[in-house]
Amino acid sequence: MNEEIEKVDAAVAHVDSHQDALDTLDGSRTHVGQSCFGAEVFDHDRPDLGESALETLSHRHDEALVSWRVHESTIDQCLRVQGGGESGRIAGLQRLRNVRPELLDRALADAGRPISALLFTSPNNPLGWVYEAREIDEIIDWADRQGIHVIFDEVYALSVYGERTFVSAASRIGSLGRNVHVVWAFSKDFGASGLRAGVLLSENEAVLEAIDGLAYWSAVSGHTQYLLGEMVADEAWIDAYRIELRTRLAMAADRVTAALEHAHIPHVPAGAGIFVLCDLRPFMIDATWEEEDLLWRRILNEANVNLTPGSACHVGEPGWMRLCFAAVPTETAVAGIRRVGDVLRSG
Ligand SMILES: Cc1ncc(COP(=O)(O)O)c(C=O)c1O
């Protein structure tokens, strides 16, 4: 431990004085890029901070984001900040298998309020799906046609272990233009959510200006930015890390999938992320949110396993629960699945 601390101290001692100072208050432009786009921006305890950045995208308080089936707790906070509204939603898990602009058109029509941005999580949370280049292109074209912003949340970009290769929206267009924005953070791919450090890619000067203003008051520390910048600049290390991450996630996902099958728990095949979405509808008598909540509590109390209920991920129908498997040793996840299976079978 002391050795680790000494290493960090030694690295910090090399932080250039200018990097340690004012210019990092609104995010380093070099390696880490524009930091501080995560919870800080969407922090509902700090509505004063949340409004200006979101308003830059939304213009008015009665406008909203329409989200493409994301894990929305953060987004809910941002919408509460924004004026208490609900996001427009694209309902129906099955329909998400095929991303079609017609679905988005319908979501816009059903939203009942002006929509100014689409938040598209790619790879998807909670489904763990990786979108193809064609699908990303369709989204970009659709947003362009509608004249709305699209924010690609690529926070699971490196956590891809299935057959499909991750395609970043940024790689599909020469210039992001005014309306396309990409966010990424160290939180998932590097298991470092506590650092609250992320990246915003945007060419929209008004958005960048608003984020600069916010970041000034809740900046990632200069030391953190510097160390993360050094880390990602080490390409050999990053390449090795990516291979190791993919290999370990694939191994864990294989074992978790086998355990779910053994416990007769239906689930949606995933190829990215740190979770798998389980279909617990067969274990409910009435397909209601109340019953989903009761089942979630029963699993928590009896199996001591905390799944994420579908309601918290805004899955369109009751009975789906997300199982996060990569934050614990795989044996622990497998033991948890066995216990969940026992609870489900005990009726
Ligand atoms: C799709 C997605 N985006 C963003 C976040 C927030 O990440 P951070 O820890 O960087 O705030 C999460 C966290 O669960 C997420 O799943």
Image (cartoon, helix red, strand yellow):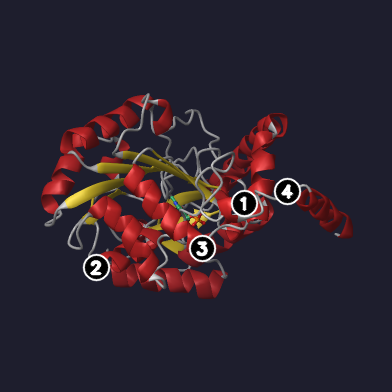
Q: Which residue is disc 1 drawn over?
A: 191
Q: Are marks 4 and 3 in contact (CB under 8 Å)?
A: no
| The C terminus, quarter of image | bottom left
Give the numbered dot on residue 15: 4
Q: Which mark is residue 218?
A: 3
Residue sitting at x 38%, y 28%: 132
Q: CA gap, disc 1 to disc 3?
A: 21 Å
Q: Which residue is mark 2?
A: 83
Q: Position of residue 59 (x, y in %)?
A: 22, 55
Q: In the rendered structure, are the residues bearing label 2 and label 1 in contact, judged by CB atoms less than 8 Å apart?
A: no
Kindly report which numbered mark, 4 or 2, lies closer to the viewer in this rendering.
4
Q: Secondary structure at mark 1?
A: loop
**Disc 1 and disc 3 in contact, CB within 8 angstroms:** no
Residue 109 showing in the rendered view: yes
Q: Secondary structure at mark 2?
A: helix
User: In this rendering, which labeled residue sits more in front, label 4 or label 3?
Assistant: 4
* Lower position in the chain sequence, tag 2 or tag 3: 2
Q: Amino acid at mark 2?
A: Gly
**Above or below, 336 relative to 123:** below
